Amino acid sequence: MIVPIIFLIICIVGSFFTGLPFGFLLNEMVIRLSRNLLLVMSLILPVITGLGLNFAITLGAIAGQIALIIITNYTIGGFKGFILSIILSTPFAILFGYLVGRILDKARGKEMITSMVLGFFANGIYQLVFLLFAGTIIPIRNKELLLASGIGIKNTVDLANIKYSLDYLIPFHKIDIGLFKSLGKYPITTYLVLFLFFLLLNFLLKTKLGQDMRAVGQDLEIARVSGINVRRTRIISVIISTVLAAWGQIIFLQNIGTMQTYASHEQVGLFAVASLLVGGATIDRASWKEALIGTFLFHFLFVISPLAGQNLLGNAQIGEYFRAFVAYGVIGLALVLHAWEKDKVKTRLKDLPN
Amino acid sequence: MKGFIYRLGIPRFIIILFLILLMIFAIYLDIPLSGLITDILVRFGMNAILVLSMVPGIQSGIGLNFNIPLGIICGLIGALISVEFQLTGFVGLFASILIAAPLAGITGFFYGKMLNRVKGQEMTVGNYVGYSVVSFMCIFWLLAPFKSPELIWAYGGSGLRVTVSLESSIRHVLNDFLAFNIGSIRIPTGLMLFFAVFAFVIWLYSRSNKGLSMIVAGSNEKFALSNGIDVDRERIKGTIMSTILASIGIIVYSQAFGFLQLYNAPLYSAMPAAAAILIGGASIKRANIFHVIMGTILFQSLLVVALPVINVIAEGSMSEVIRIIVSNGIILYALTREEELA
């Protein structure tokens, strides 16, 4: 529990130096939490299944973006467009998740670094497809999507058509009762959806499949001996993670309203993993609590650090670099501490008299 | 034929085929070959020592050292100090190395100590420790007390420049040393000789008693222990050597490139070096000098030849995309390959 507490202290101290009113920060956090939480939640299952932190949710984000490019191509907007992009992204995410699961299964013991490199690799393929093939091999109807040369998707895709299509789906602001009217400012619908996912995830962990996942995460060999298909369980876990990431990315982008075609997905894995770890999760233990606390603290730091850097050291750039340092540093530190503790347990076992 | 491909490894076979294809295209498109070969030679010399820094890491058992940004930062500090004191030519080059190498040795020692506590997760840990060191140093570059107008922003701005020109200090010192032309191909003799010296030292070391015990420690920990080899010590040694080589490597790279790249640039240095040695035939358990030379030539030729060819066929940043796909693809292949016992 020490990591979240340290972060809480940094956040509280930092927020004094920003000079921003606390209410404003809290409002900002409610919005950021709604758009990032599903991406962080998508990491929980692979951790439970013993695959470690799945940096390859980048592929899920890519699946989501492919779907968004498709609906923009056919200029389908509103909630219809949103649902359609969710439906379209699912088969892509299942396919990618299956491939990731297969590859990670071949790299047992090295899953994390493999999933990370896999994310980079997929990014290369994604760029190849949408820079070179779009407009040449893949016909694009909506010319506004293409670069001036007619080949390749633009660097930024405007998603104004589906902006807030989920966040404000239930029109609370139109209900003329004091409480509801003030609620209307917040993305309530998204929170309801997130709550639904939370229930589903908890339900899943209570089913046979969920118990199998836990067993595989505890000990591969024992799980195998007791008749669990280890490979299948691991692959399913990665598929679910990838699908959740795809949906998470769509929810994220419908709130932002513009898509950086070649950048939006790149940092997804990094930020989600850092969030989960800030919340106090480790490589083999994570739950929705850590996801919630971590996402809040990490993004709180994200909001305050440029301003705090500006006011404290006279340079906003320092705050930006500090933020990157924290994101990378927290992952590195968590990995070191975890490996360290495991090592200690091992030595203790070795020292026992036979 | 099948046996040959198997020995070569499928990805290496694909890369060589692709390279040959690109070469044919280049000839067909009338791109001057002599220019391409000159480029390949220079880029080989630029990158070879960075790739070489992977060797002690792999040999001592820490796997691909994704934390060479640590060494690179030490190298950058060395070069910055030598520019600050307005040292030029070979004096500047050797001064940078003399400052950088001990720094890299010290940081490498502590990093090696840390790696001994995270056995089995070295690559993931190394990667993130490297990233966090780079972002921490970004703050340092902003606050560092350098005064030379070559280093800091000309108008106002705080901190060091993003790229520092080496025009008036050590640019092309090695490239131009004893360089000569064959036809229109320019041979950067100094650069080649410099790499040859380091390659020879590493080769000699891996033949010596001490080097062998490092290799044994890396390939089979239990066997090494039963032979009285201190595995942890050998791993630290390998990490130190790797970090020092990386610090020297970036100085050589920068003098050929003509600029020091600060801030986020070191982030992107580990992947290409790791990819190059893997393309040369190394695995994450086994590597030697031949893999370094072969891999660097193949990888750099691919990049050099691809650039003009692809610029004719398609536009934009395609060669960058190819670099991403090839380098990460080969690392993936190495990570997922069943480890045959060496």
Image (spheres, rainbow, N blue to C red):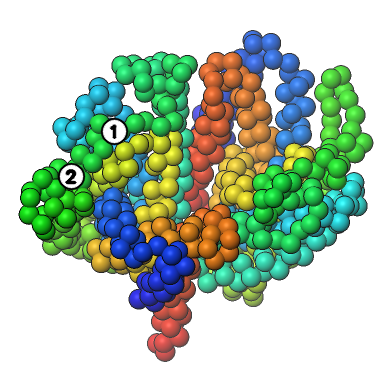
- Residue occupying image coordinates x 21% and y 52%: A186
What numbered label is drawn on residue A168?
2
Q: Is B46 placed above or below A115 here?
A: above
Most foreground residue, A262 or B212:
A262
Give coordinates of residue B317: x percent, y percent.
Answer: 54, 28
Most foreground residue, B278 or A302:
A302
- Residue occupying image coordinates x 45% and y 25%: A131
Identify residue type, mark 1: Ala
Q: Is B276 placed above or below A228 here?
A: above
Question: Which chain letter goes with mark 2?
Answer: A
Give coordinates of residue B50: x percent, y percent.
Answer: 69, 48
What numbered label is drawn on residue A160?
1
Q: Secondary structure at mark 2?
A: loop
Most foreground residue, A343 or A197:
A197
Identify residue type, mark 2: Tyr
Estimate the spatial distance between the alpha carbons at disc 1 and disc 2, rounded to whole Å. Answer: 14 Å
- The answer to whether A192 appears left or right of B22 in the picture is left
- The answer to whether A32 appears left or right of A328 in the picture is left
What numbered label is drawn on residue B237?
none
Specify few, some or many for label 2: CA neighbours under 10 Å numbering under 14, 14-19, or 20 or more.
Answer: some
Are the residues tagged 1 and 2 within 8 Å (C-beta)? Answer: no
